[in-house]
Structure formats: structure tokens, C-alpha cells
Image (spheres, rainbow, N blue to C red):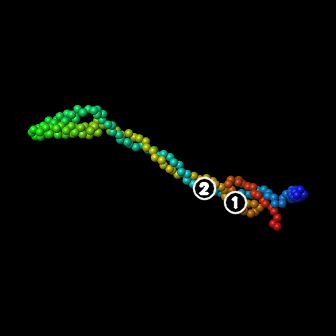
Amino acid sequence: MRASVLTALSLSLTLAAGTAVADPRDGETRVDYAEVIRVDPIIQTYERPVQRDQCWREPVTYRTAARRDRNDRAPAILGAIVGGVIGNQFGSGHGRDAATAAGALLGYHAVRDDQRYQDRYRGSREYTRYEERCAPRTEYFRDERVTGYDVTYRYRGEVYRTVLDYHPGDRMEVAVDVRPLR
């Protein structure tokens, strides 16, 4: 077993040494320079969304409520008294009592409902003020960017084309791979 390991080791060292002594130009890639004839940028156009708030001022109308003491029942009580006096003018006996009560009740509710209605409009003040309102809005902007370069170059009288991700300038390096055909 020991002999086979030694044999394999010596064989691999011999092969490695043989490769190191071989002609360094055999299968070697060299660098040379080619003349750049034309460079055209490859441009990609795209739309870039940008979201912004669009704001404007618009009129908003407000109404102030009338200030009144909600516990002030004097007008409603006065309405009940007037309604009772008017109701007392109709009927006789128990009918008169019923007409008085109905008049008082109707007078009370009529004045109270009128107060509620007038509270809504009397003494209230209406005013308009401008307030800013905003809503999101997406705008699209066209942008262009260079994604590469379409390069035409000449090497040893022959014209070639390639795409590069950089601008090569007036001349560019080319790899020349020399190896035997057979």
C-alpha cells in the first residue's frame, strides 16, 4: 500500500514538472490593441413614477350656532298661558276645561318648536374660509440611462463588433488566443 502511494505521488510530481517546463506560449492568451472605429451608446428609456401630494385651497362655509340659554322656558310658558286663554274662549263646562288644556298644550309646543327653528338661523353667523385640501397624485417622469456601448473596432484589417458596459475610448485591449489547430 505504501509503495502505491509513493508511486502515485512521484507520478503526479513528474507530470506537474513537465507542464512547468512546457512552452509558455502554447495556448496562452495575449493582449493586443485594436483601433475603435465607432461607439454608439445603448440607451434605455423608462418611466419613473413619483408620488406627490397635490394641494389646493377651496372655500368651506361654516355657520355659527345662536347662543341661547337652553333652560330658558319663559317663552314656552308664556305660549302655554296665551294658548290656555284662547282655548278658554271656546266651549262651556267641562268642554271649556278641555279646550283650555288643549290650548295651553298647543301654545306651549308651538312656541317651543318656533324657538328651535329660530335657534337654527337667528343669531347664527355664516362665514367662508379657505382650507387646504390635498390628494396623492402619481406623476411619471421619462428618464434615460446608458446601459452599454455598441462598439465597432478594427484589428489587423478585420472589422468586429461587440457590446461593452464601458466606453473604450480610441483604442481597446483585445485578447488574442494563439493555439494550434490540430
The quadrant of the image that shows the C terminus is bottom right
Front-most of residues 107 and 60 = 107
Q: Which residue type carries mark 1?
A: Thr
Residue 180 vs residue 103: left or right? Answer: right
* Dot label at residue 50: none
Report helix, strand or loop for mark 1: strand
Instruction: Please tell me how crowded label 2 is: few (under 14), some (14-19), or many (20+) other residues with Cα within 10 Å.
Output: few
At horizontal 81% and vertical 66% (from top left) the residue drawn is: 181
- The image quadrant that residue 72 belongs to is top left
Instruction: Please tell me how crowded label 1 is: few (under 14), some (14-19), or many (20+) other residues with Cα within 10 Å.
Output: few
Residue 149 in sight from this viewpoint: yes
Residue 21 in sight from this viewpoint: no
At horizontal 71% and vertical 53% (from top left) the residue drawn is: 169
At horizontal 53% and vertical 49% (from top left) the residue drawn is: 50
Residue lying farthest to the right in this orientation: 3
Q: Which residue type carries mark 2?
A: Gln
Query: In the rendered image, which residue does mark 1 sit on?
Result: 162
The quadrant of the image that shows the N terminus is bottom right
Q: Position of residue 119 (x, y in %)?
A: 28, 37
Residue 87 vs residue 113: left or right? Answer: left
Residue lying farthest to the left in this orientation: 92
Total numbered labels placed on residues in the image: 2
- The image quadrant that residue 103 belongs to is top left
Q: Position of residue 55 (x, y in %)?
A: 45, 44
Report helix, strand or loop for mark 2: strand
- The image quadrant that residue 180 belongs to is bottom right
Q: Position of residue 175 (x, y in %)?
A: 76, 58
Query: In the rendered image, which residue does mark 2 sit on?
Result: 44
Residue 136 vs residue 59: left or right? Answer: right
